[in-house]
Amino acid sequence: MNLRPITNKDQLDLKKVYFDSIQSIDEKIYTKDQKRAWSSQAWKNSDFNKSLLQGNGWLINDNETIIAFASRYPNNRIALFYCKGKSQRKGYGSKLLYKLEDEAKTEGLDVLYTEASLISYKLFLKHNWEIKSKEKVIINNKFFERYKMIKILNN
């Protein structure tokens, strides 16, 4: 396993990881229609590309195949946090989260924010993030629930 910064040439592979991550979610949590609406954002939502191109991001690869990635955009917000379905629950998310938090601390940030899905919020809680509120958003005419979360970095 290799942890390295995201580069511009990684974009298509990161979109594939994003798509795989969402499509592998159990349909008891998100329906097929919700997953379709959400996974299409890699191609339809300009903020996705901004988060990759202008953000600070890291990926994990295995034999040159990207299996997980995360990015901060703007600098104090974790905007993207995804892992291929077959690679989930193996510690890659924790590794990425530690890296993003350490990097933010080094840069002098006191706090990080995110909007976590019904899948990822438990990982954030495990790493001492706090839920500020639950919210509903609409993506491609489908309702989603997620959690606004925060972590104070320099206590």
Image (tube, rainbow, N blue to C red):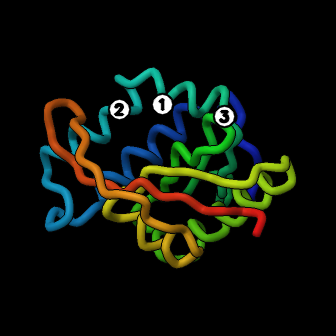
**Image position of 29 (left or right of 118):** left
In the image, residue 109 above or below residue 125: above
In the image, residue 98 above or below residue 108: below
Alpha-carbon neighbours of circle 3 within 10 Å: few (<14), some, or many (≥20)?
many
Mark in front: 3 vs 2: 3
Mark 3 → mark 2, Cα distance in angstroms = 17 Å
Name the residue beneath numbered marker 2. Answer: 41
Instruction: Inspect the image, locate mark 2, and give the three-letter code of the amino acid beneath it.
Output: Gln
Residue 153 rendering spot, x and y as whole percentages: 72, 62
Instruction: Name which quarter of the figure residue 101 lies in.
Output: bottom right
Q: Which mark is residue 67?
A: none
- Which structural element holds mark 1? helix
Q: Earlier in the sequence, mark 1 or mark 2?
A: 2
Q: Which mark is residue 48?
A: 1
Q: Earlier in the sequence, mark 3 or mark 2?
A: 2
In the image, residue 50 above or below residue 109: above
- Which structural element holds mark 2? helix
Name the residue beneath numbered marker 3. Answer: 55
Mark 3 → mark 1, Cα distance in angstroms = 10 Å
Residue 42 rendering spot, x and y as whole percentages: 41, 32
* Residue at x-position 30% and y-position 33%: 40
In the image, residue 56 above or below residue 60: above
| Mark 1–mark 2 CB contact (< 8 Å) | yes
